[in-house]
Amino acid sequence: MSETAKIELGGQTYELPVIEGTENEKAIDISKLRDLSGYITLDRGYKNTGACMSSITYLDGENGILRYRGYSIEQLAENSTFLEVSYLTIFGELPTAAQLIKFENDIRKYTLVNEEMKNIIDGFPRTAHPMGVLSSLTSALTAFNPKAVNVDNEKEMYEAICKTMAKFIVIATWTYRKSMGFPLNYYDNTKGYVDNFLRLMFELPTGPYKIDAKITSALDKLFILHADHEQNCSTSTVRMVGSSHAGLFASISSGVSALWGPLHGGANQAVLEMLEAIKNDGGDVEKYVLKAKDKDDPFRLMGFGHRVYKNFDPRARIIKKAADDVLETLGVDDPILDIAKKLEKVALEDDYFKSRNLYPNVDFYSGIIYRALGIPVDMFTVMFAIGRLPGWIGQWKEMRANTEPIGRPRQVYTGERERNYVEISKR
């Protein structure tokens, strides 16, 4: 007999089914509660509400587990490329060698962005935030691809996915080029996806850009670590917008806007701002460690601990090595990064931080890598968006394939009761 939950309301008892996921997660299905009883549930921020059933990402914050389609993040980061993980996230299985080659080649078919897109980006001032520009450009892609994708047509869906993967990385880097006043670069179809990101960002017409394999490897891992993270704010937004049957570009654009918020995608930017503040105050790391330990001091160390991972962030262990490799390869002499390494050492060795599981998280290390590569702080969230793209696509695809209903949360009204209209002369 399947498990049920009972709820008593107004002298009536209602039985609600309990749903169990493949990892033994349990949920009370309240979808018919309002029809049966007239009551709704109130859950601010949806912290305890499951909005969908998904087979993409499993996250166990208490035990520090993250898996895409059943594969541990540790194995994927060690053995896969970003495009390989993108294929897995979107289509459900790791690709064969032939499927991966085809996927890469099919993405290359769509890497050329319509020249008229330049007119749109030219309309933005150089001071415009790259995330605002990226959201607008992503939405603008709809104008150049006006035909709605038939989600029941496998070929059309596949082409739309390849087109999105191809064009998004180009326009993402164009936001940086615009802010720097550099000419816009084009994708080189003879090179790989992550290599192209570096080229698109940094190659200038005055000379070739040399790509270091260790840098590519570090970015590959970083994009993999950000590929999906369950039903976070931006992913839920993509699904919500897509539930109205809005197209893929429009839905991804909404995800970019949600990610832009400092409470979501801006964590690694907050890390660098904190490090800058410490440097400007003389660079005394010990002083700020003591401030962090003082419960009466409002100062908090950014990039330590995680709201979801209560023990440790499994992504941080992976990216720490990548950060070390990048710093060693580039030999960067930067007081900001020196402060970061001192803070890391304290957090990994000090019993105060260890006992509270305040370990450096993925945002701490990603900020260090981006800083070392010369990527400006305003571009950090754009980097996040590039990595998160396959997750957004996979979640959108799953939502449409499952024919999920349009998202329509309820509310508890707390405004005025009915009252009579008062003419303006009597107010």
Image (cartoon, helix red, strand yellow):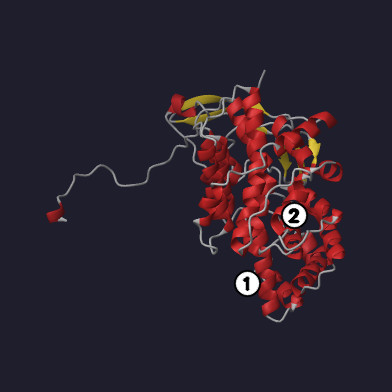
Q: Is residue 311 above or below residue 371?
A: above
Q: Is residue 316 above or below residue 143?
A: below
The residue indicated by pointer 1 is: 296
**In percent of the image, x 82 and y 45: which residue is there?**
77
- Camera-nearest residue between 238 and 99: 99
Which structural element holds mark 1?
loop
Which structural element holds mark 2?
helix
Q: Earlier in the sequence, mark 1 or mark 2?
A: 2
Residue 211, percent from left and from top: 82, 56
Q: Is residue 395 above or below residue 355?
A: above
Residue 179, percent from left and from top: 59, 62
Residue 171, percent from left and from top: 62, 49
Query: Is residue 15 at all visible to an observer of this figure?
Result: yes
In the displayed orientation, state which residue is furthest to the bottom. 282
The mark found on residue 198 in the picture is 2
Q: In the image, is 198 to the left or to the right of 235?
A: right
**In percent of the image, x 53 and y 44: which residue is there?**
139
In the displayed orientation, state which residue is furthest to the top. 1
Residue 173, percent from left and from top: 65, 53
- Camera-nearest residue between 359 and 373: 373
Mark 2 residue type: Leu
- Which quarter of the rendering shows the N terminus? top right
- Camera-nearest residue between 2 and 392: 392
